[in-house]
Image (cartoon, rainbow, N blue to C red):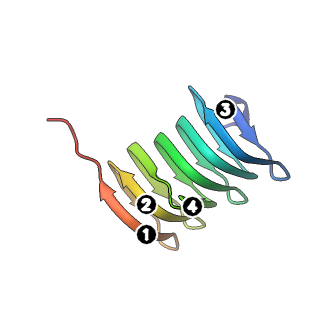
């Protein structure tokens, strides 16, 4: 995935604090974001950290994702790679965890439509 495919890119030295972001496409975070984030694809790079409410179809975690007493929701899939850590209240349709990844918190499967 090239960085030019993302509608939002937050670089390693960048911070977005207490934000409300509604992105129609894809976001890549290599820096720090806190607040609320809604997007189709969220990719958190190894140096990235997202804290707060997240609502995305697909979430790829190579860095850190924390709900901070909010909700992390993925309607399609969450992938937590070997360097990734996800913590908090997590609702998902499909969950993929690679050896070395850390998942802590309350996990719940979303109800699928029949």
Q: Choose the circle earlier in sequence order: 3 or 4.
A: 3
Sequence-earlier tag: 2 or 3: 3
The CA span between labels 2 and 3 is 26 Å
Marks 1 and 3 close (CB-CB < 8 Å): no
Q: Are marks 2 and 3 in contact (CB under 8 Å)?
A: no
- Residue 111: % across, % down: 23, 45
Upstream in the sequence, badge 4 or badge 2? 4
Q: Report the Cα–Cα distance between label 1 and label 3.
A: 29 Å
| Label 4 secondary element | strand
Q: Residues within 10 Å of mark 1 (few under 14, many from 20)?
A: few
- Whether residues under marks 2 and 1 lie with C-beta atoms below 8 angstroms apart, the answer is yes
Which quarter of the rendering shows the C terminus? top left
* Residue under label 3: 6
Quickly name the residue at label 2: 89
Which image quadrant for residue 2? top right
Q: Which of the two residues, 22 or 6, is positioned nearer the viewer here?
A: 22
Q: CA distance from mark 3 to mark 4?
A: 22 Å
User: Compared with residue 74, is residue 25 higher up or lower down, i.e. above or below?
Assistant: above
């Amino acid at each position: 995935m090239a960085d030019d495919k993302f509608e939002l890119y937050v670089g390693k030295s960048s911070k977005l604090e207490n934000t409300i972001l509604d992105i129609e496409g894809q976001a890549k975070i290599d820096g720090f974001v806190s607040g609320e984030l809604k997007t189709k694809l969220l990719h958190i790079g190894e140096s990235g950290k997202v804290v707060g409410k997240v609502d995305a179809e697909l979430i790829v975690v190579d860095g850190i994702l924390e709900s901070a007493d909010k909700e992390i929701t993925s309607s399609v899939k969450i992938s937590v790679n070997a360097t990734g850590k996800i913590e908090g209240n997590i609702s998902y349709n499909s969950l993929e965890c690679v050896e070395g990844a850390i998942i802590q918190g309350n996990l719940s499967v979303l109800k699928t439509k029949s």
